[in-house]
Amino acid sequence: MEGTSGIVHSDKPIPSHHEYQHFRKTMLAEVNAAIEGAVKAGAQEILVNDSHWNMRNLSSKILNPAATLLSGAPKPFR
């Protein structure tokens, strides 16, 4: 999650941080923008791998439906 707009330190994106829910929304907005760009560029398959902290940070309900979300652990090898 570090590197997402406004998240500049590793102590911010942990679930106990008071701004964690805000950071989750920010990360999701950036992921959705990347998905939209990939679709416009002709991507046929998009796999989003949520791999921060507990690997359950992105909401599948709000994720752009053009992508498949891989979250939680353990993760299968493809």
Image (spheres, rainbow, N blue to C red):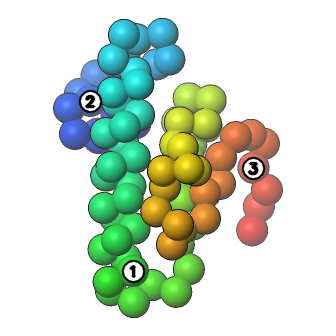
Q: Is residue 13 visible?
A: no
Q: Secondary structure at mark 3?
A: loop
Residue 74, percent from left and from top: 78, 42
Q: Nearer the viewer, residue 78 or 22?
A: 22
Q: Is residue 70 left or right of residue 2?
A: right
Q: Residue at x 52, y 66 (%)?
A: 65
Q: Is residue 5 left or right of residue 2?
A: left
Going from N to C along the chain, the mark reached first, 2 or 3, is 2
Quarter of the figure with the C terminus: bottom right
Q: Which residue is mark 2?
A: 7
Quarter of the figure with the N terminus: top left
Residue 11, percent from left and from top: 37, 15
Going from N to C along the chain, the mark reached first, 1 or 2, is 2
Q: Amino acid at mark 2?
A: Ile
Q: Amino acid at mark 3?
A: Lys
Marks 1, 3: nearer the viewer: 1
Q: Which residue is mark 3?
A: 75
Q: Residue at x 26, y 30 (%)?
A: 7
Q: Nearer the viewer, residue 6 or 3?
A: 6
Q: Quadrant of residue 48?
A: bottom right
Q: Is residue 21 above or below residue 33?
A: above
Q: Which residue is mark 1?
A: 39
Q: Secondary structure at mark 1?
A: helix
Q: Residue at x 37, y 37 (%)?
A: 25
Q: Is residue 1 above or below residue 49?
A: above
Q: Is residue 28 visible?
A: yes
